[in-house]
Image (cartoon, helix red, strand yellow):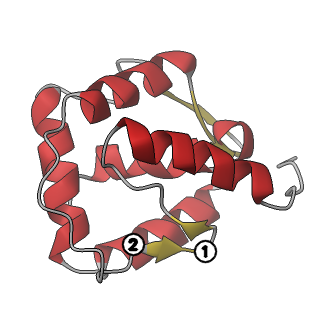
């Protein structure tokens, strides 16, 4: 599993791209034990940006209360996802889940549109203080 890609994917799934470190650790642990699928996806994404360094590239900001994905981080993640070649999709395999719910799939533009609709249906979460 590529940890830096996983962090970007998790942060983008949180409201305002901001998460407490404990929440991130819990979600990373869940994904790390979810099987080879997640590991293979993150490796494919990481291959698009071989020198990925989320902190030195200023893709993620660290605060005492948590981590926040920057606009640049969102852009790099979109770049990685837009250049990922879709593989054969097994519709019987459920998407990995974390404490927040389903992790957005990495399968192209149609899924991003659907992901946007599903985010609109989610109940609002409390802001991280």
Q: For this rendering, which residue is in front, 12 or 50? A: 12
Q: Residues within 10 Å of mark 2 (few under 14, many from 20)?
A: some
The one of 112 and 124 positioned closer to us in this rendering: 112
For the residues marked 1 and 2, what is the alpha-carbon distance in whole angstroms? 13 Å
Left or right: residue 22 versus residue 1 is right
The answer, for residue 8, to whether it is visible in the render is no
- Residues 54 and 92: in front is 92
In the displayed structure image, the side of residue 59 where residue 69 appears, left or right: right
Residue at position x 47%, y 16% in the image:
72
Q: Secondary structure at mark 2?
A: loop
What residue do we see at 13% from left, 60% from top?
Answer: 40
One can see residue 86 in this view: yes
Q: In the figure, 40 relative to 27: above or below? A: above
Secondary structure of the residue carrying tag 1 is loop
Residue linked to disc 1: 99
Residue at the image position 22 percent from the left and 80 percent from the top: 35
Query: In the depicted view, which residue is nearer to us: 8 or 105?
Result: 105
Q: Nearer the viewer, mark 1 or mark 2?
A: 2
Q: Position of residue 109 (x, y in %)?
A: 39, 36
User: On residue 121, which mark appears?
Assistant: none
Q: What label sits on residue 95 in the rendered view?
A: 2
Rendered position, 94 above or below 15: below
Q: Residues within 10 Å of mark 1 (few under 14, many from 20)?
A: few
**Residue 64 left/right relative to 71:** right
Location of the N terminus (image quadrant)? bottom left
**What x and y, as percent, mark residue 117?**
66, 48
């Amino acid at each position: 599993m590529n940890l830096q890609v996983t962090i970007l994917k998790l942060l983008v799934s949180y409201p305002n791209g901001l998460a407490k470190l404990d929440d991130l650790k819990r979600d990373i642990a869940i994904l790390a034990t979810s099987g080879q699928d997640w590991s293979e996806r993150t490796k494919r994404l990481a291959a698009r940006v071989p020198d990925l360094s989320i902190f030195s590239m200023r893709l993620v900001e660290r605060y005492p209360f948590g981590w926040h994905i920057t606009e640049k981080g969102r852009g790099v993640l979109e770049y990685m996802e837009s250049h990922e070649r879709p593989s054969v999709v097994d519709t019987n395999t459920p998407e990995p889940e974390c404490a927040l719910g389903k992790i957005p799939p990495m399968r192209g533009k149609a899924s991003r549109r659907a992901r946007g609709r599903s985010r609109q249906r989610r109940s609002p979460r409390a802001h991280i203080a």
